[in-house]
Amino acid sequence: MAKASINFKAVKESSERHNDRLQELDYIEPQFTAMNETWKSHSIADMEKEIKRYCKATSGRKMQKNATPIREAVVNLNHHHSVADLRKLSDKLEEKYGMKAFQIHVHRDEGIWENNDFKHNYHAHIVFRWQDMASGKTLRLNKLDMSQIQTLVSQELGMERGEYKENSNVVRLEAVEYKAQQEEKRLKTLQEQNQVLEQKKNTVREDIATVRERIARLEAKGASIDETQGSTESALKRIIYLSTEDFEKEEQTLLKFDENSLNGAIKELELEIKRYEASLRNSKRASADEI
């Protein structure tokens, strides 16, 4: 279950296209897009015009060029949360802090595949009119307000509150950052699997070397091959039942078989690691441009 979290930032030009799924995204699973929910009362462009008009009418001045009177919040969710839940939350936020939601988008089609199971990254985007309705200027909230908002979100959505920011370096992961984090985990797993295969290959070599040494010692003592039956615990003990000449052939066949299969598996893993490394680099480069 996800912990409660809300993260505000200035809205971007691409936000509406992203939220409405009007742009191509490589980290969504289209089969789940129909599960998304959207509510809106205004487009971002129309709301921007209204905000500027209201600022001029109320304060007598144009809004400053560097002002950010439209902000977008990304909210962690669990699978059962809906637009209705977010509208109730938005009403509470407007009542207590003054920001007014005019778009809500619940996304259920983002996430990552793990062992043939899709791990959903449930979240919502709420787009707010970030304007002080008394002055017409941009709304101003302090650190205490923002901390209290985190608590309010956890209460309204019935979720465990995330750690207080001063006690944690954890922040809400954006879509591409989430994908990058999951790929880092996947990459680590692949590297561990690669290491295990390398170790297994070395074990095969060591087992063969051990059997060879044992046969050499037995032959040096003049022991017959029959006398060695059942005397070794090696996984390859059947080899010592063979004649010396046959053993050499069997050894080469076994080594070739195991090394070929292991090397093939290792090469496949190495290729997959390279693909994930490339995908990870692309994800991190894209994170600055995504929602």
Image: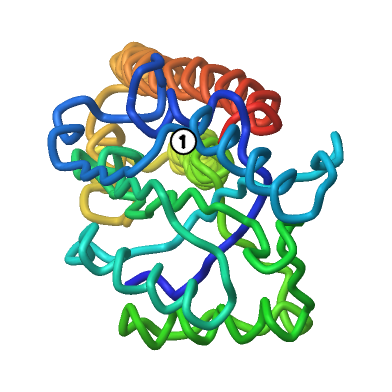
Helix, strand or loop for disc 1: helix
Residue drawn at point x = 76 percent, y = 68 percent: 140
Answer with left or right where residue 234 lies relative to residue 35: right
Seen in the picture, residue 138 relative to 238 is either above or below; the reply is: below
Answer with left or right where residue 226 lies relative to residue 137: left
Question: How many numbered tags mark residues here?
Answer: 1
Asked where in the image residue 114 lies, by quadrant, the reply is top left
Q: Can residue 219 be seen in this view?
A: no
Residue drawn at point x = 30 percent, y = 18 percent: 250
Residue nearer the viewer, 70 or 86: 70
Asked where in the image residue 242 lies, by quadrant, the reply is top left
For label 1, the residue is: 197
Residue 131 rendering spot, x and y as whole percentages = 65, 57
Residue 193 rendering spot, x and y as whole percentages = 46, 40
Residue 115 rendering spot, x and y as whole percentages = 25, 42
Residue nearer the viewer, 75 or 163: 75
Answer with left or right where residue 284 lies relative to residue 110: right
